[in-house]
Image (tube, rainbow, N blue to C red):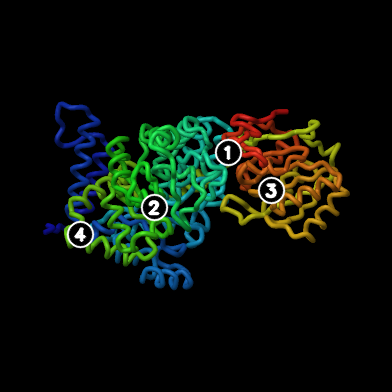
Amino acid sequence: MHHRTSRRSLLTATAAVAATAATGTTAHAEPRSRDHDHGQGRDRQLKRLIAHMSIEEKIGQLFVMRVYGHSATDPDQADIDANLTDMGVRDAAELIATYHVGGIIYFTWAHNTRDPYQIADLSNGIQRAGLAQHTPVPLLIATDQEHGIVCRVGYPATLFPGAMALGAGGSRDDAYLMGRIAGSELDAIGIRQNYSPDADVNVNPANPVIGVRSFGSEPDAVARMVAAEVQGYQSSRIASTAKHFPGHGDTAVDSHTGIPVITHTREEWERIDAPPFRAAIAAGIDSIMTAHIQFPALDPSNDPATLSRPILTGILREELGYQGVVITDSLGMQGVRDKYGDDRVPVLALKAGVDQLLNPPDLATAWNGVRSAVESGEITEERLDESILRVLQVKERRGLLQRPYVDARRIDRTVGTRSHLATADRIAERTTTLLVNRAALLPLSPRRRTNLLVVGADPASPSGTTGPPTTVLGKALTELGFAVTVLSTGTSPTAETIDAAAAVATDMDAVIVGTYNTGPGDPQGRLVAALLAAGAPVVQIAIRNPYDIAYLPDVGAALATYSWTDVELRAAARVIAGRAEPRGRLPVPIQRADDPAQVLYPVGHGLSY
């Protein structure tokens, strides 16, 4: 039975944790290390807070949930309707009051991230709702802000090159600086947990879900970059999250739509997949996200790793010594739903060793599934308390108990500042990789080759873009003095589109063509062949995976940007114009198209001017 106290006394208990954290002292100092005493005092206060929670509040603390709307209490009617359909609540405040969730995840498609001031207001509204509960606890607001191709908070925030681009730059200082600056901007708008960095080692060029989200294919290099980015984020009071344990880098199946099987042996896991997670743990990572993958060498049961006690408790907790928060990847993904029902998945995840349950498809089903397991004794209240303590420790460590609200006056001083944007541009220049430069085609001069055609793929734009890639690149080259014609041909150009592009190319001094994950028989390859036949020199830019050059052997020059966000395309334009030196080096090998056993360009390849 819970002994209830007044809400005022609970707020006092929360404040006491904050005071302990702020002073670094406790009321029960003993002749031991100050850090130990501080930790003991903090944990006593947190356990006191947990003791005041009802079972319903404890269950809710373990869930991190989506919610539609730009406001915690006054969303648009369409978002109210979506919330009612999905969760039976009208808005974020009602979600928190009903389910006592411990966290909220922001998505662009849920209309959470319109602009920095709106995000800050939403964050403050969510925190007011959290502190209005019977047991007042701030929420851990999270998002996926990996940079590169995965961004939820876009312009005018500072957007950096993604992981594989940073891997091409090879600078731990840049990875740290990116984390510190990006973290400071998230902190300013009330986001305190970021699901980044990706700690997967991408050893499979056909990987459909990781690819450029990984720093590369060399475990030790990935480990160094992961550790640096973790330290950068957490220096800015952001709980960093390494993902996807035990390693999602060698799969040809997307866990959003199916369940991948990793065939690495235990020895291969130790050598390939484990080093970045070990490095993240050594760097003091706050949270680690699970993968919805089968890994028979680690657990022969065929349960996904998210539901595997041998993997999450046996390996992650006991062998690697990790004591922080374990969070699932989204429970709405098919990879974790194939084997068990949505009511059992969260229960099995908790039994495996998970602490935070991310974004179940049906919150009521998941929440009631956990409650039924507690009522039956399948999950003990003590087991809930273990996870809640870990989550509260992160909330305290990242300043939520001391400072749950954000001050909008910080936004102009922090988000998208001139110095932050300049730093992102400089880092991007150090990541752009020149793979081919026949007859010293690059750099182009606006005096010698004035008229350029910018053509190619315009995939759906992530939040780090202000327009389609051809438009952004064309504008950047225009500003550098070229006369530019822009023609979008898409990722699957038709014969008519290809003919039209080739006709325009005949009158150009050079052609810049952006390709997006081209392969054998891809119409993008036919487009490039037609542009070459038109006679103008062709510069190809791989705007996502760098492997495209294997299928385009005759281009005059080839660059890899690893993404099509503005910062990387602007850097590519400066490299093309000779305003910046290409410094990137491949962080993954590129195999021959006709013989994948042979390496066309090895790790470390990259040309300079």
The amino acid at mark 3 is: Thr
Q: Nearer the viewer, residue 478 or 381?
A: 381
State the SS at label 1.
Answer: helix
Checking the image for residue 165, the label placed there is: 1
Q: Nearer the viewer, mark 4 or mark 2?
A: 4
Give the Cα distance between marks 3 and 2.
Answer: 36 Å
- Type of the residue with mark 2: Ile
Q: Earlier in the sequence, mark 3 or mark 1?
A: 1
Q: CA distance from mark 1 to mark 2?
A: 27 Å
Of the two numbered discs 3 and 2 in the rendering, the one whose residue sits closer to the viewer? 3
The amino acid type, in three-letter code, at marker 4 is Val
First of labels 4, 3 by sequence position: 4
To which quarter of the image does residue 231 belong?
top left
Outermost residue on the right side: it is 507
- Mark 3–mark 1 Cα distance, whole angstroms, equals 16 Å
What residue would you read off at disc 2?
A: 141
Q: Is residue 263 visible?
A: yes
* Residues at marks 3 and 1 touching, judged by CB atoms closer than 8 Å: no
Image point (31%, 39%), residue name = 315
Specify which label sits upstream in the sequence, 4 or 2.
Answer: 2
Query: Tag 3: Cα neighbours inside 10 Å, few (<14), some, or many (≥20)?
Result: many
The residue tagged 4 is 374
Is residue 307 found left or right of 596 in the rendered image? left
Tag 4's secondary structure? helix
Q: CA distance from mark 4 to mark 2?
A: 26 Å
Q: Which residue is mark 3?
A: 515
**Number of marks:** 4
Q: Residues within 10 Å of mark 4 (few under 14, many from 20)?
A: some
